[in-house]
Image (tube, rainbow, N blue to C red):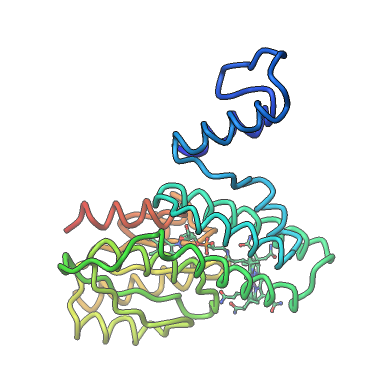
Amino acid sequence: MLTEEYSELIINPLGYIGNTILPSKFSLNQRANSIENKYKEKKLIMLDLKILSQAMGKLEEDQVMELLKEFAATNPSEAEALDAVAACQAGMGIVGELFETGEYFVGDLIFAGELLTEAINTLKPALGGSGSTIIGTILLGTVHGDLHDIGKNIFRSMSEAAGFEVVDLGIDVAIEEFVAKAQEVKPQIIGMSGVLTLAIDSMKETVEALKAAGINAKIIIGGNPVTKEACEFVGADTFTTNAAEGVKICQDWV
Ligand code: B12
């Protein structure tokens, strides 16, 4: 896994290679070259996830894009790209905190959303190509009252790459729209996204309406505020705050 080996290397950036300390007779250059070779050997990349999160939190567009373009050029694996997505997500946590403390304003949230979309687009090639065989259909949308869609879009891209056909209803999706589309496309799975606290109530209302209409698709909810308790309250089958985990669950369901 990238993160473990990578953290070894960032904790000890020059003197160590994995658990091996290079004897001091080696010059700094030799040490640096050996580290570079070690990266090459293990197909590791010189992406500092902590610096990426911080740059994202500080909304340093040039730094974020430079880091990610260099990273994408190394042809990272999907797991490595997911580590980078998680680092970007952590950066959004910093943005959220600075918004709450009054240092950032709505304009900064808008910019953060644009920067995150740009960042994820750079990582998309590594997040999997589109599957040729359709393994199932997912009806997806951000629930009513909520306009956030970056996490939903990540889940959509990854589900499509895994072979799902995704019918994406977009953002602020009315309950009736979920119900009507579910009756029309008869998906095996319904995915609901939301990052506002109020999204949990919207999810509950939507799930109740779907059940009342006799729709028996599996229901998965995702987004920052979802928890086990929220899932029970909503009446969904499961929940996750991680798109990759969500895709695995959906694969197990079909
Ligand atoms: C960017 C952003 C915006 C952008 C959104 C742009 C866009 N196109 O989405 C804009 C500027 C529009 C915005 C608006 C607002 N925002 Co805003 N926003 C954010 C911010 C900084 C990042 C959100 C984000 O994209 N996170 C990164 C993604 C990748 O994470 P994620 O959504 O959790 O998704 C991951 C998983 O959860 C999962 N996933 C997501 N969905 C699904 C679905 C399924 C089915 C599955 C399986 C998985 C899955 O996959 C993803 C990858 O792993 C957050 C701060 C934060 N900490 O999150 C605030 C935040 C969510 N916003 C907040 C607020 C208050 C607002 C506004 C009310 C501000 C205002 N005064 O106008 C408005 C609300 C508008 C509305 N009605 O929705 C608050 C919410 C507070 C609350 N508790 O409700 C937050 C938490 C900031 C804060 N700390 O105060 N925002």
Name the spot of residue 190 as percent of width and height, x first: 29, 69
Side of 205 relative to 218 (left or right): right
Image point (39%, 69%), residue name:
192
How many numbered discs, if any?
Answer: 0
Residue 112 is situated, as x and y percent measured from the top left of the image, at 67, 70
The answer to whether 226 appears left or right of 13 in the picture is left
Residue sticking out furthest to the right: 103
Task: Locate the N terminus and report the quarter of the image it occupies.
Answer: top left
Residue 2 x, y percent position in the rendering: 48, 39
Q: Which one is nearer the viewer's eye here, 209 or 63? A: 63
Name the foreground residue: 210 vs 138. Answer: 138
Quadrant that contains the C terminus: bottom left
Q: Is 176 located above or below residue 198 in the figure?
A: below
Asked which quadrant contains residue 165, the reply is bottom left
In this rendered view, identify the residue nearer to me: 73 or 115.
73
**Snapshot quadrant of residue 119:** bottom right
- Which of the 4 image quadrants contains residue 147? bottom right
- Whether residue 250 is situated above or below residue 22 in the rendered picture: below
Q: Please state the horizontal and vertical placement of residue 20, each as a whole percent of the image.
A: 58, 17
Tell me the residue at 24%/68% (across/down).
164
In the displayed structure, 30 sits above or below 52; it is above
Image side of residue 195 versus residue 243, left or right: right
Q: Quadrant of ligand 1?
A: bottom right
